[in-house]
Image (cartoon, grey):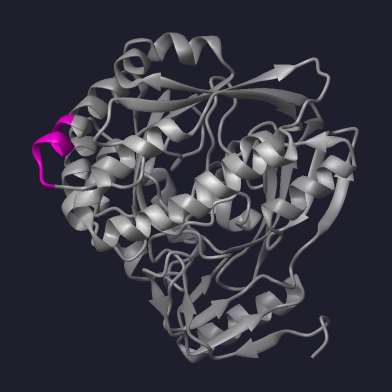
Amino acid sequence: MTDTYARTATNAWRNWAGNVTARPVRTVSPASVDELAEELRRASEDGLKVKAVGTGHSFTAAAATDGLLIRPELLTGIREIDRAAMTVTVEAGTPLKRLNTALAREGLSLTNMGDIMDQTVAGATSTGTHGTGRDSASISAQIRALELVTADGTVLSCSETENPEVFAVARIGLGALGVITAITFAVEPVFLLTAREEPMAFDRVTADFDQLVAENEHFEFYWFPHTGNCNTKRNNRSAGPAAPPGKVGAWIEDELLSNGIFQAACALGRAVPATIPSIARLSSRALSARTYTDIPYKVFTSPRRVRFVEMEYALPREAAVEALREVRAMVERSPLRISFPVEVRTAPADDIALSTASGRESAYIAVHLYRGTPYQAYFTPVERIMTAHEGRPHWGKVNTRDAGYLAGVYPRFGEFAAVRDRLDPDRLFANDYLRRILGD
């Protein structure tokens, strides 16, 4: 089969973490927008629900279906770089890693990004993937236009001037509005970031949190449960010169410690939970301070080879420290043994209807557990803390919220629902996850 024709298969699909499995009636890989539109029409005639899937980095069943599963591996590559407008238009199935390296070759970069780059551009943006930033927001907030194929096969071009009511909600569309086939991102000339990674006590980080956020373009930290220790990371633009980490040092920090030894520690902790507090104390002291300067994607992103499940909530930024302290107190008074650090990041307010930072400055608190570890006893009380602070769950990460709750924390929830009713009245793109979070 050549790349000029759609590929069809009937294999089961499993997400990256292994906690979601789907068995679609058929799976297709369209090689063009026209082929995709035809597949949607055929699925509708056959009475099949449709979901598009990326690389499976969501921990929810956002892409699961027992109908038609669309895989995007033939819809990849850069369509156009517009240096006058400073935009790049890219096919929806392109992995962020390929986009970042291609842009770097052209002397260009996204302004901000998350910490992994294995996702497809459509998967990352549709679920609201974000990094951390004082002034620069999520990947979705960098979208300037997108191409969307709707339930009846219509191809919509969406931007602030073309189908603006769809554009206002489709930048984080959850796969509920149609299938995205191309995205136009704002880009800028490639720049340098200096990263400063430094251990810091929990009490100091939380006491100085507002100052650390204000003084740095990108600030994040990780707290190691069962300890009073954190690891902080500050990324700021630099005039250079580039000074990437040495190969040996980078391998020790990013591969040996953060992946190899951490993998072994997690496996031991799952087998013998009583060892976890001791492991946490050792892990929190193993990473040393370091500073390096490089192009953005080499600073923002890191390899993530240890598989896990995750829950993350966006809170009003002013509530973050109190909520984190409540999480710490809950862990300390419980029999829980938590092997993964808790991650804290920030984002400015944006104007996307279902963005977790929609209309408010936000801080994110993310909790993780090693893949295969029962997570409900940990995630449930954490979620209770987050929702008490009007938290908004990350759309691609474990949560139990429903449309009733979400309509209360998203002022523009009804706006999204109205566009969905217009574009997909028969719910071709529905699945159990969307029925829970959006209603029907």
Residue drawn at x 21%, y 31% as measured from the top left: 328
- The range drawn in magenta is 329-335
Residue drawn at x 51%, y 31% as measured from the top left: 351
Residue 208 pos. (x, y %): 38, 10
- Give the side of residue 319 with respect to residue 237, left or right: left
Query: Vertical placement of 183 versus 106: above or below?
Result: below
Residue drawn at x 40%, y 76% as measured from the top left: 21
Query: Vertical placement of 357 versus 433: above or below?
Result: above
Residue 91 pos. (x, y %): 74, 59
Q: Quadrant of the N terminus?
A: bottom right
Decide which of 403, 279 is in the foreground and name it.
279
- Magenta stretch: dominant SS? helix
Q: Residue 162 sits in which quadrant? A: top right
| Residue 331 among magenta residues | yes
| Residue 76 among magenta residues | no
Q: Quadrant of the C terminus?
A: bottom left
- Residue 7 appears in the picture as rendered: yes
